[in-house]
Amino acid sequence: MQGFSIGETGGDAMSNLQERRKAKGLSQSQLAKASDISVRMIQGYEAGYKDINRAAAISVKALADALGCKIDDLLEEGSDE
């Protein structure tokens, strides 16, 4: 069993971060090493229990740099409160 899903989209929707990571063929561990962001934090962003839109800019930039994309590509729509 995969675990649990959080959010109104259910378990089928992937986060932008997860989509980019998988498109690059990277594991969470590989992305963590490339970006110097912990695997735990990446898991949180991908699962939706940590809001990447509220993350430190330097963290999101590190992830974007490691994935070869723009910061905006990783931010989620409809996450403003």
Image (spheres, rainbow, N blue to C red):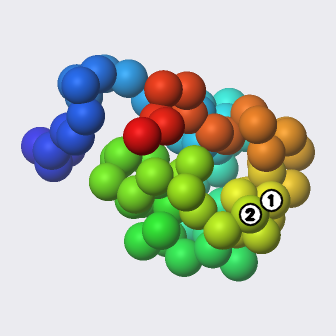
Residue 10 spot, x, y in % from top left: 22, 24
Amino acid at pointer 2: Ala
- The crowding category of the residue bearing disc 2, from other C-alpha atoms within 10 Å (few below 14, some 14 to 19, many at least 20), is few
User: In which image quadrant can residue 70 be found?
Assistant: top right
User: Residue 72 or 28: which is nearer the viewer?
Assistant: 72
Numbered disc in front, either 2 or 1: 2
Amino acid at pointer 1: Lys
Dots 2 and 1: beta carbons under 8 Å? Answer: yes
Q: Secondary structure at mark 1?
A: helix
Q: Residue at x 74, y 63 (%)?
A: 57
Residue 8 visible here: yes
Residue 30 visible here: no
Q: Residue at x 80, y 59 (%)?
A: 61
Is residue 12 left or right of 21 when viewed as pictured?
Answer: left
Q: Residue at x 25, y 34 (%)?
A: 7
- The crowding category of the residue bearing disc 1, from other C-alpha atoms within 10 Å (few below 14, some 14 to 19, many at least 20), is some
| Image quarter of the N terminus | top left
User: Residue 17 or 71: which is nearer the viewer?
Assistant: 71
Is residue 72 left or right of 65 when viewed as pictured?
Answer: left
Distance from disc 2 to disc 1, alpha carbons, whole Å, reads: 6 Å
Q: Secondary structure at mark 2?
A: helix
| Image quarter of the C terminus | top left
Residue 29 spot, x, y in % from top left: 56, 67
30 above or below 80? below
The residue at the far front in this view is: 81
Q: Say the numbered circle drawn on residue 61.
A: 1
77 above or below 3? above
User: In which image quadrant can residue 49 be found?
Assistant: bottom left
Residue 20 spot, x, y in % from top left: 67, 36
Residue underneath mark 2:
57
Residue 9 spot, x, y in % from top left: 29, 22
Q: Say the numbered circle drawn on residue 4.
A: none
